[in-house]
Structures are given as C-alpha cells and as structure tokens.
Amino acid sequence: MRYTVIVGCGKIGRELALQLSKTENVVMVDKNSRALNSLGDDFNGKKIWADALDMNTLDVAGIKDANTVFLLTGNDNLNLVVGKVIKRKYGIKKVSLLVNDDIKRKIFQEVGLTIINRTNLMVGVLKKGSA
C-alpha cells in the first residue's frame, strides 16, 4: 500500500489528506493542533503535531518509507528547505511542494522538485477553457 506524508494542513493539505486516506496510508504533519483537528473523523491516517523543520519529526512521520511527500505549508522557504532535505537525505523521488511566489517557483524548479503554483494552475485551466 502507498505511503504518503503531507506537511501543511491548510485547505489543500486537508482535502488531499482526506481523499488519499481512503485508499492509502497517510501521515499529516502540522504545527497547528487546530488545523490537525479540522481533519475530523473522516481522516483515516496518522496526525503529527510538530514542526517539519525538526528532523526528528520527519523520522516519526516515517519519511524514509514514504512513496510521496507533499509540502503544502503557506511558507515557500520552509517548503523548499524541507523538500531539499527529504530529496537528498532520504532519497524520496516524488516530492511536490506548494510555491506561491512566481520568482521562487522558477528557482525551485531548478532544484529538481515538483512545483505546484496556484497561479500557473489557474492560468492553464482558464487557457484550456478559452480554446
């Protein structure tokens, strides 16, 4: 069974965790306990209330066994730092991170991480709709 670690329990992270936990093992990491509690009873995974910048947190999350990691915090720099560590130290191939700043998006892509940028996604959807 697939094993996914998600860091950041905002709107996107919460919805992704709820969907994925129906079919695979999911661990949600966030330093906000209220955000973790917002997952409710439908979440069939593990919650870790901690800071992802702490390497101990990643070990507790079972990062070395993860197939996929999503870094979906609102902090572009945190997403990049943790993403680079996960990629290099643990050798996880599928590391995707949310990047809001378009300039940072271009820089981060050069690092070899999968970048998710809301603006680019919306522009792509809107362009397809107008074609």
Image (cartoon, rainbow, N blue to C red):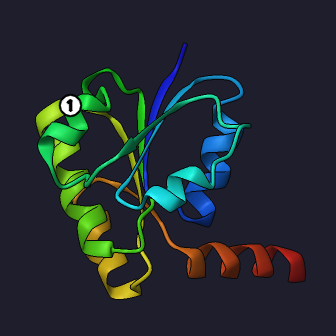
Q: How many marks?
A: 1
Task: Report x, y in % for residue 58.
Answer: 23, 38
The amino acid at mark 1 is Asp
Residue 12 drawn above or below residue 48:
below
Question: Residue most toward the top?
Answer: 1
Tell me the quarter of the image containing the C terminus: bottom right
Q: For residue 73, what is the image quadrant? A: bottom left
Q: Residue at x 73, y 37 (%)?
A: 42
Tell whether 89 sits left or right of 46. left
Tell me the crowding category of disc 1: few under 14, some 14 to 19, or many 20 or more residues within 10 angstroms, Cα based: few
Element at label 1: helix
Q: Can residue 41 be seen?
A: yes
Tell whether 127 sits left or right of 56. right
- Identify the residue under disc 1: 59
Residue 6 drawn above or below residue 12:
above
Task: Report x, y in % for residue 20.
Answer: 65, 35
Residue 102 drawn above or below residue 118:
below
